[in-house]
Amino acid sequence: MTHRLNKLAQAGLITRRSTEGDGRSLPVELTASGRQKAEAAFREDMAPEAKLLGGLSDEEQAQLTDLLRRLEASLVPDEL
């Protein structure tokens, strides 16, 4: 993990800060460039789904969302 994080930091995609209490961990934060790359990758990953939903009207997409939420609720047992 350290090697990967070092490569991301060298590429300017993340910043790492040391913490006072624990030298074993370093918080990681995306830089503006890292955030742009992550968002672009997410959009690319979601493109097939967007294409599928593009054939539905906004109202139909809302109905589908509601139906999928109901389906999920019926499959996941209630937690007490």
Image (tube, helix red, strand yellow):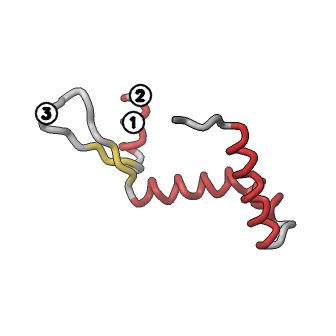
Asked if the residues shown at circle 1 and circle 2 are in contact, with their CB atoms under 8 angstroms apart, the answer is yes
SS at badge 1: helix
Establish if 14 lies above or below 61.
above
Q: Amino acid at mark 2?
A: Met
What residue would you read off at disc 1?
A: 5
Asked if the residues shown at circle 1 and circle 3 are in contact, with their CB atoms under 8 angstroms apart, the answer is no
Residue sitting at 18 percent across and 30 percent down? 22
Of pointers 1 and 3, the one earlier in the residue sequence: 1
What residue would you read off at disc 2?
A: 1
Q: Amino acid at mark 1?
A: Leu
SS at badge 3: loop
* Spatial separation of the CA atoms under disc 3 and disc 2: 21 Å
Closer-to-camera residue (43/37)? 43
What residue would you read off at disc 3?
A: 21
* Spatial separation of the CA atoms under disc 1 and disc 3: 21 Å
61 with respect to 11 (left or right): right
SS at badge 2: loop
Residue 1 quadrant: top left
Establish if 28 lies above or below 66.
above
